[in-house]
Image (tube, helix red, strand yellow):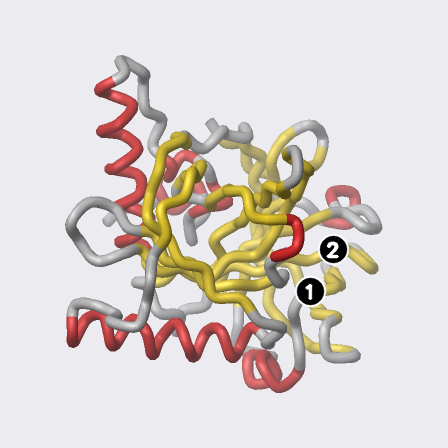
Amino acid sequence: MSQHFHASDYSRYFSLRQKVYLVNMSVERDNEIYESLSGVVTSSGMDSLELMIAYGGNSTYGDDVGKTTYKLTSEALGSGIQVLADLTGIVSGNIFQFRIHGTLELFQRRVVPRIEFTARIFQMCGNYPLEFFRKEWKRVMGHLRTNGDLPRLVLKETEINLSAGGIGFAVDSANRPTPLSMLFVELGESLPVCALAEIIWEQHVGERRRYGFRFIYILKADQERINSFIGDSLKKSGVAHLDYTRNWVLVDKMSADDSKPR
């Protein structure tokens, strides 16, 4: 259940260094893709906000100024929050300036269902900008749709923890992945899921390191595929399955959209 507030001063919900996830809500966005960014608050005003984006750059987002809208999601007052914001400027390459508007929604944070299992995966790393990864993702997806496979891709059996929102697995300590990567995950007999991901946590596990990744660029159809795969696995174990769309961070809509006439 969500609560809606017509706030006149949004700054009370955003403090310095607060983590914020951005979800693309622009009218002209590709509605088949879930696209997200991460940032931290550097300044906030009554209806303005500045976020330092982890992998920004004018060359990547300069054309989006004045015509891009994001849903900003974070935590405040012990709840999840989300509100719409228009991108109004970019400073120093990675400081995004926003004008916040409309209803601010408070919602209960939801744990995304996840399972541990062995799957064949491949990870492409490199110290490349996000724009490079996005172009490569589109090239790879086009190839998959046309040819049905990637003959040069060697997927490796790996113990993973998977959800519609991300993936976790361990690697040798000497092979630390870059902050951004492209991941391929084989699910059944169909084409592998291909997603761009960012590291959000890491920890030591013996002589290895375990990493948690958040999907930031993925087909919504693949989110659904992962969700169905997890749901089927949990049902076999007699465990109830909570659909990922109840987690507002993973969808490009506001809770008020569900009450609008269709």
* Residue under the image location 68 percent in, 37 percent down: 204
Q: Amino acid at mark 1?
A: Ile
Relative image position of residue 165 (x, y in whole percent): 45, 44
Q: Against 113, is 62 above or below?
A: below
* Quarter of image, res 207: top right
- Residue denoted by label 1: 53
Q: Disc number at residue 36?
A: none
The secondary element bearing badge 1 is classed as strand
* Quarter of image, res 89: bottom right
Q: Residues within 10 Å of mark 2 (few under 14, many from 20)?
A: some
Q: Is residue 34 visible?
A: no
* Front residue of 65 and 134: 134
Q: Against 90, is 227 above or below?
A: above
The secondary element bearing badge 2 is classed as strand
* Front residue of 135 and 149: 149
* Residue under the image location 62 percent in, 42 percent down: 208
Q: Earlier in the sequence, mark 1 or mark 2?
A: 2
Q: Amino acid at mark 2?
A: Val
Q: Is residue 39 visible?
A: yes
* Residue under the image location 40 percent in, 70 percent down: 29
Q: Residues within 10 Å of mark 1 (few under 14, many from 20)?
A: some
Check contact, mark 1 vs mark 2: CB within 8 A: no
* Front residue of 245 and 76: 245
CA gap between label 1 and label 2 equals 7 Å
Relative image position of residue 13 (x, y in whole percent): 73, 43
Q: Is residue 145 left or right of residue 140?
A: left
- Residue denoted by label 2: 40
Relative image position of residue 30 (x, y in whole percent): 35, 69
Can you name the residue that lies furthest to the top here? 238
Q: Is residue 17 left or right of residue 174?
A: right
